[in-house]
Image (tube, grey):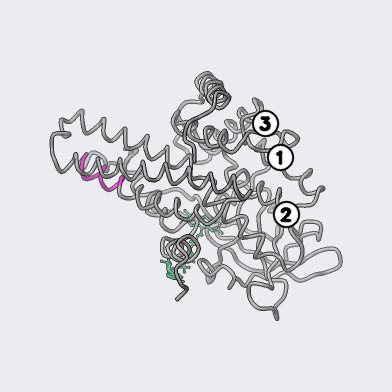
């Protein structure tokens, strides 16, 4: 692992930094729908300038950047406190999954509108009785001529209310062993047979939803990776979910820690050994996270796809973010907890970090078995 940037990587970073400075959209509006529209417009601005997903091929709107340049991109965006593009699940999950498993027609049809933000995507994996044990899902798809007819329920579907397409995993063979009877579909959300009901979170937002699917139709051409291959295709999505965010998230964490340190300094609290000790420990954890994110990047460069190391970064990021938010409220006092304080929002939102994208317990199992090579229980 070499942590020094080459001259061309430094030139890439400087060009990007200058571009972000000239085009930063400012702060997002408070209203949820307006904030979403704001992030969508931001994605369009990135796309028009060729920055929406830099390591994607040029033919789909990317700029063929290397993985290191993609990491620089995420770091710079987080450092400038620029918003995440709206179609985050499309860019991080659906796009890379289609690039691996899609046929030529699917690549030509879906990738460019993901990049431009014209078509938003959501992830229909979790069900009321299938979260961590995803392969236990019950939503079924039955072949009917050129279509599949789908019935079932999904839950926690982030962004479904804005989405045109859903990455849907459904059971297509009731008799096969549970991991083998699944298929992965691209489902059109714009049909009456798919009902979206928002779920309101502790933050007050309804970021995710329940999906009720009653005989929805999906053309066979929207099957991704072939019938019965749903588990393998879903794993590609999950690996990208954990690895993809690592760079932006670890810088985002450092930005928030610097902000907390500044606020503590302004209150004269840095001489308090307990405060200094907590901030110091958080700083160390951020550094470890940064280096682990680079290690994951090295593995991706070696093997062509993200590996289970992404689980380690996600695990460390979620516990560190929660520890940081707890420290912020302890150090800054009740002022951090009032409704309009950004810290109170972050504190509440951080509770979900150890559940979303794989719970801490599941990630520990993955790290133990597949990163450390410990025996399975
Ligand atoms: C903010 C947020 C956004 C989300 N967005 C989406 C989305 O867009 N699309 C989507 O499909 N899903 C989404 N999810 C769902 C998320 O992936 C699931 O919540 C997660 O996989 C856990 O599933 P579950 O909630 O059913 O919990 P369960 O699997 O029922 O787990 C309950 C508890 O048991 C523990 N547990 C379960 N199995 C084991 C085991 N084998 N060993 C040890 N402990 C275990 C878990 O760690 C957890 O603490 C989102 C969740 C959140 C919080």
> Which residue is at a point 53% across and 49% down the rendered structure image?
243
For the residues labelled 2 and 3, say whether their Cβ atoms are less than 8 Å apart: no
Residue 101's disc number: 2
Name the residue beneath numbered marker 1: 113
Q: Magenta stretch: residue 328 in it?
A: yes
Q: Give me the C-alpha separation between circle 2 and circle 3.
A: 21 Å
Residue 125 part of the magenta segment? no
Residue 172, position as x, y percentages in the image: 72, 71
Label 1 neighbour load within 10 Å: few <14, some 14-19, many 20+:
some
Which of disc 2 and disc 1 is earlier in sequence? 2
Q: Is residue 368 left or right of residue 144?
A: left
Q: Nearer the viewer, residue 132 or 352?
A: 132
Q: Please report the bounds of the magenta region as a residue range.
A: 324-332
**Residue 176 position in % (x across, y down):** 69, 78
- Which residue is most to the bottom? 175
Give the x, y percent position of residue 335.
23, 38
């Amino acid at each position: 692992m070499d942590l020094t940037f080459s001259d061309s990587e430094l030139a890439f970073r400087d060009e990007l930094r200058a571009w972000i400075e000239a085009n930063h959209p400012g702060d997002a509006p408070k209203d949820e729908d307006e904030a979403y529209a704001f992030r969508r417009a931001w994605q369009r601005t990135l796309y028009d300038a060729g920055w929406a997903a830099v390591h994607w091929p040029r033919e789909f709107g990317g700029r063929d950047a290397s993985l290191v340049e993609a990491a620089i991109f995420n770091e710079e965006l987080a450092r400038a406190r620029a918003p995440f593009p709206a179609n985050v699940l499309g860019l991080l999950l659906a796009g890379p999954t289609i690039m691996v498993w899609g046929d030529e027609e699917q690549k030509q049809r879906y990738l460019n509108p993901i990049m431009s933000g014209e078509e938003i995507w959501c992830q229909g994996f979790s069900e009321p009785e299938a979260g961590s044990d995803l392969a236990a899902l019950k939503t079924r798809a039955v072949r009917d001529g050129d279509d599949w007819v789908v019935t079932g329920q999904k839950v926690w579907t982030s962004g479904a209310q804005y989405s045109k397409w859903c990455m849907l995993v459904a059971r297509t063979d009731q008799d096969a062993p549970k991991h083998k009877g699944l298929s992965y579909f691209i489902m059109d959300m714009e049909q009456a047979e798919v009902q979206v009901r928002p779920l309101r979170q502790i933050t007050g937002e309804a970021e995710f939803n329940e999906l009720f699917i009653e005989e929805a139709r999906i053309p066979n051409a929207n099957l991704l990776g072939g019938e019965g291959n749903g588990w393998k295709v879903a794993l590609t999505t999950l690996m990208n979910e954990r690895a993809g965010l690592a760079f932006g998230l670890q810088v985002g964490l450092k930005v928030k820690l610097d902000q907390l340190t500044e606020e503590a300094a302004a209150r004269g609290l840095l001489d308090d050994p307990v405060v200094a000790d907590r901030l110091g420990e958080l700083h160390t954890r951020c550094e470890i996270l940064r280096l682990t994110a680079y290690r994951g990047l090295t593995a991706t460069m070696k093997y062509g796809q993200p590996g289970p190391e992404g689980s380690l970064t996600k695990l460390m990021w979620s516990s560190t973010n929660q520890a940081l938010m707890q420290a912020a409220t302890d150090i800054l006092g009740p002022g951090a907890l009032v409704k309009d304080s950004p810290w109170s929002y972050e504190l509440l939102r951080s509770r979900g970090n150890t559940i979303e994208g794989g719970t801490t317990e599941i990630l520990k199992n993955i790290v133990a078995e597949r990163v450390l090579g410990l025996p399975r229980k």
